[in-house]
Amino acid sequence: MDITLTDTATKTISLTETAAEKLGGILEQKGLRESHALRVFVKGGGCGGMQYGMTFDDDIQEADQVFEQFGLRVVVDPTSFFYVGGSSIDYIDNLMGGGFHIENPNAVSSCGCGSSFRTSGAPAGAAAGAGCGSGCGH
């Protein structure tokens, strides 16, 4: 099995200005702006085989990748960074509601709701049978 290492010096996790404004407002409202970062992570599951997750975290680990933009920190563990390095986080607000959206250049497919995805290294059958129609259950 060949392993390709990701060059973290050239890949980042970026926030759009819209996402930064929304994220900053949420952190401010919760009184966490100075102490916490947005942790972005990947876990197995979802109809695409992998699922995005986000949480506020004040426990930054030595191995974490930390990106700062617009006065906000985004933190990603090394395993998750392998899958989401180079991604951009945006905030989308439309008639169906609002939410954060990850634009991931490593994803070769994603479910209809955008919460789960598959990379080129994942088996093609990972999403088979799960079906992500309009009632996505990830």
Image (cartoon, helix red, strand yellow):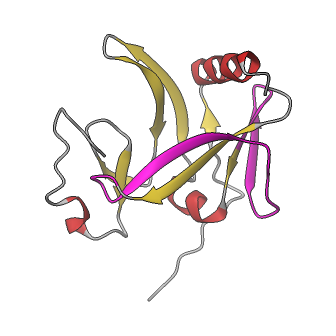
Is residue 92 rendered to the left or right of residue 7? left
Residue 39 in picture, x, y percent from top left: 65, 44
Check the image and name the residue furthest to the top. Answer: 95
The one nearer the camera, 39 or 10, is 39
Please report the residue visible at 54 percent of the width from the left and 34 percent of the height from the top.
Answer: 89
In this rendering, the answer to whether 19 lies above or below 43 is above
Residue 117 in picture, x, y percent from top left: 35, 51
Range of the magenta residues?
46-74
In this rendering, the answer to whether 8 lies above or below 25 is below
Numbered circles on residues, count: 0
Is residue 117 rendered to the left or right of residue 39? left
Residue 107 in picture, x, y percent from top left: 38, 53
Please report the residue visible at 33 percent of the width from the left and 60 percent of the height from the top.
Answer: 49
Please report the residue visible at 80 percent of the width from the left and 27 percent of the height from the top.
Answer: 71
The one nearer the camera, 87 or 51, is 51
Q: Is residue 7 visible?
A: no
Is residue 73 rendered to the left or right of residue 120? right
